[in-house]
Image (cartoon, rainbow, N blue to C red):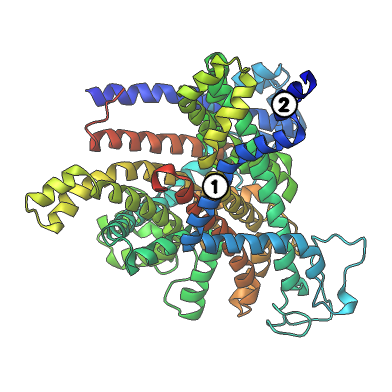
Amino acid sequence: MQIATYIIRRLILLIPVLLGVSIFVFALTRVAGDPISVYVTPRMGIEEIAQLRENLGLDESVPVQYFLWLKEMIINLNLGYSKFAELPVTECLVKYFPATLELTLWSMIISIIIGIWLGTISAVKKDTMVDHTTRVTSLIAVSIPVFWLGLLLLDLFYYILGWAPAPTGRHDEISYPISEINSYTQIMLIDTALNWRWDMFVDALAHLILPAITLSFATVALIVRMMRSSMLEVLGSEFVRTARMKGASERTVIRRHARRNALIPTTTVIGLSFGGLLTGAVLTESIFSWPGIGRWSAGALLANDQAAIVGFTLFSAIIYVLANLIVDVLYAYLDPRVRLG
Amino acid sequence: MKEKQESILDEDLSFKGRLKDIKNALLPRLRELRFSLYLMKKSKISLVGLAIVLIMIIIAIIAPYIATAFLPENLLPGPNADPMRIPRDYSIITPLPPGSEGHPFGTGEYSTDIYYGIIYGAHVSMRIAIFVVGIALLIGLALGSISGYFGGIVDEIVMRITDVFLSVPGLILAMAVVVVLGRGLDNIMLAFTIVWWPAYCRYVRGQVLTVRESTFIEAARATGARDSRIIVKHILPNSLAPLLVAATMDMGTVVLVTAALSYIGFGADPGMAEWGRMVSDGQQYFIAGSWWMVVFPGLAIMMFVLGFNLLGDGLRDILDPKLRK
């Protein structure tokens, strides 16, 4: 009950922030030139454009235009037309987002598992070889350009070793056409498993591994660093000493007492790193031809497709603030000392 | 007799006396600095970082002179040539591997000299990092301290604006700015400055709020110091250390994200001395076996970013009073 009111209040607080983002991007598009270009499709004639200008109220003053634009966006979900994809922006988001969701989801899961595991080991074996290696490696990992790492992995595992499939997207359309399975979640690994098509599952997994590793590299490093420092803090606290004094085995102390408490500050970093994943997706998807919103936005940027970039920015803002809201709720759930309010 | 007495009274105001005052005031700071350097010497990680950063700074400064060191005479850029553009040798048909005469790091697409690109790229990256972090710091310091010190409606407005900026991942917001401003490195620099200051602003404000309540600020106010003096002389120096750490690490991050936009193709033009662009120029050849076109510029980015990250990591340990004892 308390959590429900907390979530509702937080959702209401998000509205002014998202309105602020919309004002910012709206102001940007007005700086750029004639705003009608966002709505024009190549099939329109001159009269149609004049008619559209009147319909959209682009002959009105700028504040009025903003409200009309906002209304169009919220009521009709009309974000304009993406020249690059030759589709309305809303349709692009619906079409490309599942691929990005799949990539970021698995990357997040990889990052959390490896990050927490390595961070715990590094803290427990402080100042040993393992710890030093982990610390230096994680600093190197946050310094590597994502696109460069992706290219190196692709070159090594596809062109040289031939272990990975060609970077053609989420699956091999020729051998395993997507029409052969029913889509339940739009997430290929889950869909193929639900259809009991394990051959397709393996194919999808093989396509996913390299991009997911590329994308999760920096996130793993962030989580390791946070996990290590909070674990060290917890290991030095009174209740861990008490647990040891009781005669609990080292394994129990670490698993039941220390790690659980060290996880609390780490959740915040996980929420923040979601922004890094969205950003990294732009580059990773471009390299691996992954058909997600990241690759679409990178192409749109080059094609100077403003409507697409505006839509992508607003959409990322929504995803990002919602992800952080979920993390805050989790945080409160994990840490009973936190009062929701 | 009377004259002499006066001169004794005035002695503290004479030049020598003032020098002594300054010396006395500086001594504890000097001791502090020496202690910091001692701590730094003990931490290997930060020393390695400092070394990489210093080497990068030196390369960045002397880049215009050493970038052309190995080039054959017919390729030397003329006095009016754009130094961003890497000199090309049109007589080369297949890319030359590293170690070739005149091209120690090999040649890239359009027969560009990779060595020139790497060296001059350090100059370009350093300029971008200093510009973005510098301007963002200035804006963040000014708005953050005003916002935290005065509170009220000013604080409310500034904080709501930073909320908006921080609710979109930086690179994505920069993409939105850049698609409006148009292509080019200068526009990327501007875009990142626009999206970078809110983080510093929030940080400074938080620090100011904590420091503002301390007793020594109350004391300063009791002596009649003006607001501006309290902010500049007392509050900011006491909130600077963690900001310095963040800014050091951001020097690297800025270069990383600029290279990313450049790699996508929105920054420098093809054949320019910018590391992200060079990776993107060389990637088709990379597959065919010309690894040097991608490996060298990527390594350059990594070393640059790693240097600042290591230094920042070390500085954090050194400047944190809790860890100093």
- In the rendered structure, which amino acid carries the disc numbered 1? Arg
Task: Name, please, the residue furthest toward the right.
Answer: B79
Q: Is residue A266 visible from the viewing direction of this image?
A: yes
Q: Residue at x 39, y 37 (%)?
A: A324
Side (left or right) of B229 relative to B216 = right
- Front-lying residue, A127 or A272: A127
* Residue at numbered disc 1: B31
Using a 10 Å C-alpha cutoff, classify the residue at mark 1 as few (fewer than 14 neighbours), some (14 to 19) or many (20 or more): few
Side (left or right) of B194 relative to A133 = right
Task: Name, please, the residue furthest toward the front.
Answer: B1
- Image location of residue A201, percent across then percent down: 32, 63
- Image vertical order of residue B151 relative to residue B275, above or below: above
* Residue at numbered disc 2: B8
Mark 2 lies on a secondary structure that is helix
Side (left or right) of A226 relative to B60 = left
- Front-lying residue, B114 or A250: A250
Callout 1: chain: B
- Image location of residue B284, percent across then percent down: 64, 71
Q: For the N terminus of chain A, give its image quadrant.
A: top left
Question: Residue A9 sits in which quadrant?
Answer: top left
- Image location of residue A109, percent across then percent down: 33, 53
